[in-house]
Image (cartoon, helix red, strand yellow):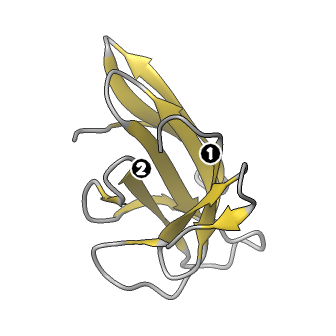
């Protein structure tokens, strides 16, 4: 991941896909720890004190009753999920952002239906 411009796209089935912008080529998807049939569409990418991280959250733009978004964190340098997916917000998300809090990487998510803001510690 280092040294060349990259784009990270959220893929289907709980994955992220690196894109090499110089070569204009899609890379191999990073698969999650368990298969899912939804597509992650909210993506935040950042580099804290360590390897670059991506965080994805599923979203349901129609806020179907009973839908709960799933959040995943990815180690982009090693090409794998940091942990198992976690339930994030009932009704989906409207945003996800990476930042640091007290020198540690965190993801901040905002729920669509539950209107809550959550801070998630990201550990490697």
Expressed as whole percent of the image width and height from the top left, the position of residue 36 reads 43, 84
Image quarter of residue 115: top right
With respect to residue 106, does 69 lie above or below? below
Badge 1 crowding class, 10 Å Cα cut-off, few under 14, some 14 to 19, many 20 or more, is some
Q: Secondary structure at mark 2?
A: loop
With respect to residue 54, does 64 lie above or below? below
Q: Which mark is residue 20?
A: none
Measured Cα–Cα span from mark 1 to mark 2: 29 Å
Of marks 1 and 2, which one's residue comes earlier in the chain? 2
* Residue depicted at x 53% and y 34%: 3
Q: Is residue 110 visible?
A: no
With respect to residue 3, does 23 lie above or below? below
* Residue depicted at x 39% and y 31%: 106
* Residue depicted at x 48% and y 47%: 54
* Residue depicted at x 68% and y 71%: 60
* Quarter occupied by the C terminus: top left
Q: Which residue is mark 2?
A: 76
Q: Secondary structure at mark 1?
A: loop
> Relative to 85, is 14 on the left or the right?
right
With respect to residue 96, does 49 lie above or below? above
Foreground pick, 30 / 58: 30
- Residues marked 1 and 2 touching at CB (< 8 Å): no
Expressed as whole percent of the image width and height from the top left, the position of residue 105 reads 36, 27
How many numbered circles does the render carry? 2
Residue that sits furthest to the top in the current view: 102
Badge 2 crowding class, 10 Å Cα cut-off, few under 14, some 14 to 19, many 20 or more, is many
Q: Which residue is mark 1?
A: 115
Foreground pick, 91 / 109: 109
Q: Is residue 28 visible?
A: yes
């Amino acid at each position: 991941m280092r040294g060349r411009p990259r784009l990270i796209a959220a893929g289907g089935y709980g994955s992220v896909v690196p894109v090499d912008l110089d070569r204009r080529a899609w890379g191999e998807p990073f698969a999650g720890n368990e298969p899912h049939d939804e597509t992650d569409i909210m993506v935040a990418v950042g580099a804290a004190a360590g390897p670059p991280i991506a965080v994805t959250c599923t979203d349901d733009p129609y806020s179907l009753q009973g839908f709960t978004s799933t959040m995943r964190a990815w180690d982009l340098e090693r090409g794998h999920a940091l942990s198992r997916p976690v339930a994030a917000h009932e009704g989906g998300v409207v945003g996800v952002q990476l930042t640091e809090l007290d020198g540690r990487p965190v993801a901040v998510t905002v729920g669509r239906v539950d209107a809550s803001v959550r801070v998630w510690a990201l550990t490697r």
